[in-house]
Image (cartoon, helix red, strand yellow):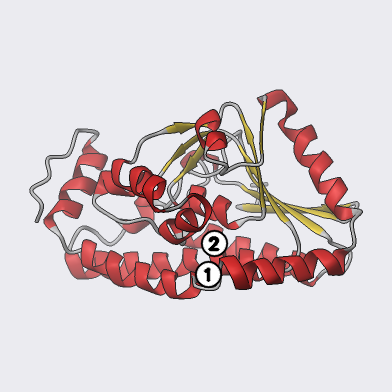
Amino acid sequence: MSQPIVGYQSDNHIATITMNDPKTLNAFSTALKEAMMDALDKADKDADVRVIVLQGSNNNFSSGGHIGEMLENGMESEALLAKLDFMLREVAEVSLKLRSIHKPIIAKLEGAVAGAGMNLALTCDFRIAADNAKFVQAFVNIGLIPDAGGIYLLNQLIGAAKTTELVMLGNKLKAEDVARLNLVNEVVSADELDASVQALATRLSQLPGKALSSMKHMINVHAFGGLNEALDMEVEQQNMMAVTDDFKEGITAFMEKRKPVYQGK
């Protein structure tokens, strides 16, 4: 019997949600998104759950957007634009859901933490990374802009200068690099990751839940009050990028595994 694309387990007041599409390194397809929203709803409504852990299977968090699904209707501009718009709105729903749940959410990060995967991790309340985690804002490499609230979240967490560097250059970052930027709470060895996440989740589960909920609500108001508007702007801007020659070149080069040649058009 095949495993579900998103696993769910609850034990000792801790719900663990596992993205499980190892062939794509847990890329965000429509199927994964829908299953994740169901799992998040379940954890949100379960009064016995006090903490949520979000992780990926096979030692990877997430490679980001599902390129195969994006291109499933072909490269013709109208079909591609419609699919991209739909997928952007899907991943935006997950970002909003992660903030609207007034329970602490821990992102357990290892392997690929890329694109939308990185940005959804930034939406969580805590991030613990294994030293083998690799982070990248990969969007510029195919002529797009960050989704899942990426630019907004980075601006809130590290300011405009470093945000500009990360999203415009699209450099790959090691766990130690993101730790220096204060984008993760802790970096541990891969062997220690499970224990470290479990220790934090257990500690949080033993704290006063109503106080934690109130704190998250206040943090949302003061630090993330503009997230909804930012996500709407992403869709608008991404739709503009989707009809450019540079995007077509970027995505074609990606599929052909070659370096793109951009013309600024």
Q: Earlier in the sequence, mark 2 or mark 1?
A: 2
In the picture, measured across the screen, residue 256 lies left or right of residue 124, that is left
Residue found at x 86% / y 47%: 203
Quadrant of residue 61 in the image? Answer: top right
Q: Position of residue 241 (x, y in %)?
A: 22, 62
Q: Position of residue 10 (x, y in %)?
A: 83, 54
Depth check: give the residue in front, 20 or 116. 116
Instruction: Report the number of discs.
Output: 2
Q: Give the spatial CA distance, label 2 vs label 1.
A: 9 Å
Residue kind at label 2, given as amino acid type: Lys
Residue found at x 75% / y 34%: 194
In the picture, measured across the screen, residue 194 lies left or right of residue 79, that is right
Which dot, 2 or 1, sits closer to the camera?
A: 1
The residue tagged with tag 2: helix, strand or loop?
helix
In the picture, measured across the screen, residue 197 lies left or right of residue 35, that is right
**Residue annotated with mark 2:** 33
Residue kind at label 1, given as amino acid type: Glu
Q: Are marks 2 and 1 in contact (CB under 8 Å)?
A: yes
Q: Is residue 203 above or below residue 130?
A: below
**Residue annotated with mark 1:** 93
Q: Position of residue 222 (x, y in %)?
A: 60, 70
The residue tagged with tag 1: helix, strand or loop?
helix
Tell me the crowding category of disc 1: few under 14, some 14 to 19, or many 20 or more residues within 10 angstroms, Cα based. Answer: some
Q: Is residue 101 visible?
A: no
Residue found at x 10% / y 52%: 264
Q: Is residue 142 visible?
A: yes
In the picture, measured across the screen, residue 263 lies left or right of residue 76, that is left
